[in-house]
């Protein structure tokens, strides 16, 4: 078993013991990636990594067993299409000593039919929960290898943003600028994941899709992009100004930057996630734009582009060293423009380290 997998299973079992969890059931996806470094192709055939207090096992479709065996030495309990998974599942639970757990934690991304099949195989009085206090708690704190991949991806995103800044000009469409961004990610071996380009009034829609709208002189352009390489993502938002900024832009940009600074100051180990959101939101509200900040201040990032911790006004998550999350306040003025400034940070002992090296000042496009 790879050293990293063994270490992560040990850490998971420690969390299981702490939380009184007798079984963690993991479906193909990011949780399995975190534990094993891979996951089988997810489809309609039930496939589960079952982790008990002492042992682990795979419920594995026989059709996939040979191909997956090269990646792991974990015990397989295989089942064929003509017999179904029920017998193999019960054998797997018995094999790891988890046929009657008092509490089972289900991978929250699991297909509903997989979850119901597992619940039906357990005693009726088994309590059920999801993984935030076991796997989720562990995944929120990134190790050095995860940090290195996130930092690398942040550098690629910085360069993709710079490529967008170099290309933007009046007369091109949002979609054409998005194509430049995608091409840059691909040129560095990263898979483009999203490319929000919102010019003028379109910038007031936080999740605007790049359209045929032509970029014009006087536009403020929101550019929010991300790619993925070596299993980890990036996410960054910056602003471009095409010629002179629209009326009121400079004031609003300054307010959003002050909100970023307030959130960075509030982001400390031991703080509550909601305190970071409150810090950013207070700056914007005090300036009279509270109704135009329409989303949370941030989201965690790791294997998934959006994962815990979520930086919301209601989150009671205690921030810890190694947590990675976005800080991205925004102000969106309907029919005029939007401004969002987003950085990904990793929380260190003395506060946040910003992964990007790009200034948050708007890029001025000369006409």
Image (tube, rainbow, N blue to C red):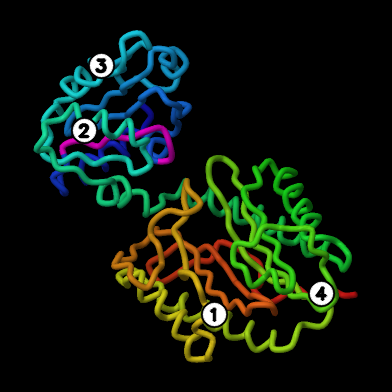
Residue plotted at (19% across, 20% down): 90
Q: Which quadrant holds residue 79?
A: top left
Q: CA distance from mark 4 to mark 1?
A: 23 Å
Secondary structure type for disc 1: helix
Residue 119 circle label: 2
- CB atoms at circles 4 and 1 under 8 Å apart? no
Q: Observer-nearest residue: 230 or 130?
A: 130
Q: Earlier in the sequence, mark 4 or mark 1?
A: 4
Give the residue pinned by disc 4: 242
Residue 292 circle label: 1
The answer, for residue 138, to whether it is visible in the render is yes
Give the label, 3 or 2, closer to the camera.
2
Whole-percent x, y for residue 148 in the image: 52, 50
Q: Mark 2: few, some, or many residues within 10 Å (few <14, many ≥20)?
A: some
Q: Earlier in the sequence, mark 4 or mark 3?
A: 3
Give the residue pinned by disc 3: 88
Q: Mark 4: few, some, or many residues within 10 Å (few <14, many ≥20)?
A: many
Q: Mark 3: few, some, or many residues within 10 Å (few <14, many ≥20)?
A: many
Quarter that holds the N terminus: top left
Q: Is residue 232 magenta?
A: no
Residue plotted at (78% across, 53% down): 180
Whole-percent x, y for residue 6 in the image: 31, 33
Quick check: 61 above or below 114?
above
Whole-percent x, y for residue 155 in the image: 64, 55
Give the label, 4 or 1, closer to the camera.
1
Q: CA distance from mark 4 to mark 3?
A: 62 Å
Residue plotted at (38% across, 42% down): 109
Secondary structure type for disc 2: helix
């Amino acid at each position: 078993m790879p050293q990293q997998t063994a270490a992560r299973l040990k850490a998971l079992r420690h969390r299981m013991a702490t939380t009184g969890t007798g079984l963690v059931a993991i479906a193909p996806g990011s949780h399995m990636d975190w534990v094993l470094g891979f996951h089988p192709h997810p489809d309609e055939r039930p496939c589960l990594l079952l982790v008990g207090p002492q042992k682990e096992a795979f419920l594995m479709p026989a059709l996939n067993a040979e191909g997956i065996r090269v990646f792991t030495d974990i015990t397989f309990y295989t089942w064929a299409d003509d017999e179904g998974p029920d017998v193999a599942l019960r054998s797997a639970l018995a094999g790891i000593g988890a046929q009657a757990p008092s509490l089972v934690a289900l991978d929250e991304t699991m297909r509903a039919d997989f979850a119901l099949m597992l619940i039906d195989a357990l005693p009726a009085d088994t309590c059920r929960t999801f993984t935030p206090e076991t796997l989720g708690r562990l995944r929120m704190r990134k190790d050095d290898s995860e940090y290195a991949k996130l930092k690398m991806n942040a550098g690629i995103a910085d360069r993709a943003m710079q490529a967008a800044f170099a290309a933007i000009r009046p007369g091109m469409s949002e979609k054409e600028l998005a194509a430049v961004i995608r091409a840059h990610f691909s040129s560095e071996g990263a898979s483009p994941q999203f490319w929000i380009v919102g010019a003028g009034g379109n910038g007031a829609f936080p999740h605007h899709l790049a359209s045929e709208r032509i970029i014009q002189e006087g536009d403020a352009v929101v550019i929010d992009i991300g790619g993925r390489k070596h299993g980890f993502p990036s996410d960054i938002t910056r602003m471009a100004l095409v010629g002179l900024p629209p009326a009121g832009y400079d004031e609003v940009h300054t307010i959003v930057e002050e909100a970023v600074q307030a959130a960075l100051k509030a982001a400390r180990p031991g703080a509550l996630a909601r305190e970071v959101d409150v810090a950013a939101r207070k700056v914007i509200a005090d300036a009279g734009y509270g109704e135009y900040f329409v989303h949370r201040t941030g989201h965690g990032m790791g294997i998934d582009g959006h994962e815990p911790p979520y930086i919301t006004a209601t989150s009671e998550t205690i921030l810890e060293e190694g947590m990675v999350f976005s800080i991205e306040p925004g102000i969106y003025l309907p029919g005029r423009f939007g401004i969002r400034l987003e950085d990904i940070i990793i929380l260190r002992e003395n506060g946040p380290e910003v992964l990007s090296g790009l200034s948050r000042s708007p890029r001025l496009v000369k006409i």
